[in-house]
Amino acid sequence: FCLSPAVSATMSPPWSEGFDSAQSALKEERFFDGVQFINSCMEAYAKVVGDESDRVVKDPGSFVEEYTSKLTEEQKDVLRKMYEVRGDIITGLGANKRAATDYQCAQKLGAELKDKVAQAEAKTKEKKASGKVPVTVLTGFLGSGKTTLLNRILKEFHGKRIAVIENEFGEVGIDDSLIEAGPLTTEENIIEMNNGCICCTVRGDLIAGLKKMVKNSIKNNKPLDGVIIETTGLADPAPVAQTFFADDYVQQKLHLDGIVTLVDAKHLIMHLDEEKPEGVENEAVEQVAFADRIVLNKCDLVDEAHLDEVEKRIRMINDSVKIQRTTQSKVDMDFILGIEAFNLDKILEMDDAFLEDEQDHQHDDRVTSCGFHVKGEVHQQRLNEWLAWLLKERGVDLFRTKGVLAVQGMKEKFVFQAVHMAFNGAPQKEWEPGEERISKLTFIGKNLNRQELEDGFKKCLVGGGYVAN
């Protein structure tokens, strides 16, 4: 069995440069870069020896079994070294179970790696090393109760220094007005990102925000007890989780404690069954699939039979995930924090492309947001009538409606939220003396008619003064 004629004795094999880069990345502990290099060079190697698939990386056992007898001793030696280097790189990222598989493949090709195999297998049973700041990714479809849960966490852990990154899908930010920080969660520890989705367009901002938080905590000698990332309701959690392996500084200072997914008991099945355009992911499915914990929220809105069906559907996607039923996001904190539940090996078994850089993530372009920012007040009766009509007639396509409003004659800020046709609203904090009375509201949904929404809201205003964002 010989090399392809395209690879002559005077030419470097096509995998050579990539293998050198992988070994350099390993020495420099740039493990995520190392995965990209080693995967690329191994796939190039496989093509030269006659395999056009990606089995050499994704199904190494079957590749080695089929090709060992066909390879020259020199080719076996190259492949043995590749599997050992890949095992070392994957170990650096924490995927010890998968690293053991790569080491075992290297052994079948003649390597003596019993110690490395034993160490990798032992590490799969160990608790994660301390010293890194734990990060919780809080995800879930629009209106599932993420911000309510975030506020519960900040209240219950009022003695902890928790940093928050809040990502909102919408033209006008609302959620920042709803976050109730504890005494140790200062403004410098809250970063809002509302100029894009954290899983794609502002992922670089997420990395920068995490670095800034950690560096500030070190500089000010105020160590963080934890970080919570609240994603948009339309985020795919996979690229967010990948962030903790893609950036070397982030990987050294932080570790992903778990992905907590809130689901709306009343509306989850509808979103799981929604047909998406070709090439577009169903975010609700991805959020359930990647969850380490699921908070089955709003259980008071449905009966027991419906709850059982929702749990059955969840299990069809993620059969081993732990589920806790709740109302108003009231959940035991030890169910969602300090759980050490994120497992890279488990993710790679489910999605073997998880560590591939520059994955394509496409949102449904039928889903948009429309927001308004108004200096002035709204008339309560007209507002009630308009919202009642809107949710009844357009509720199916309105995934999320939320606002903080200045209502004529009301001392408090009126905060309302709606998920499809389900509406909830109440007066909350009083307006401060001299504070400008401003109304903000955002709609997120499918096939939104901006002009219709603008005209309807305009009729609710007291005395005009309309400004739209």
Image: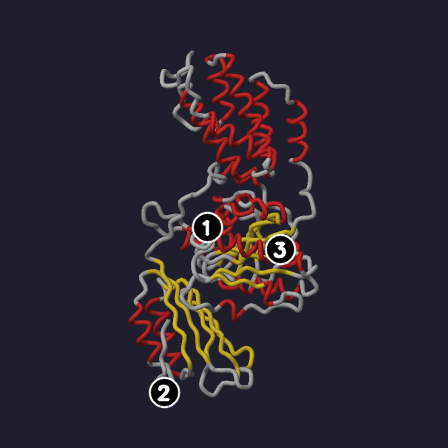
Percent coordinates x, y for residue 300 in the rendering: 53, 63
Q: For the residue marked with disc 3, what is the amino acid?
A: Val
Q: Closer to us: mark 3 or mark 1?
A: 3
Say left or right for 417 vs 321.
left
Return the residue at label 1. 236
Residue drawn at the location 64% of the way across and 26% of the way down: 117
Compare marks 3 and 1 and give the one earlier in the sequence.
3
Q: The C terminus lies in which quarter of the figure?
A: bottom left
Q: Tag 1's secondary structure?
A: loop
**What distance separates the C-alpha of mark 2 from that of mark 1?**
42 Å
Compare marks 2 and 3 and give the one earlier in the sequence.
3
Return the residue at label 2. 463
Return the residue at label 3. 214
Picture layout, residue 76 above or below residue 388? above
Percent coordinates x, y for residue 309 in the rendering: 48, 51
Foreground of the two, 252 or 389: 252
Q: For the residue marked with disc 2, what is the amino acid?
A: Gly
Residue drawn at the location 45% of the way across and 55% of the way down: 202
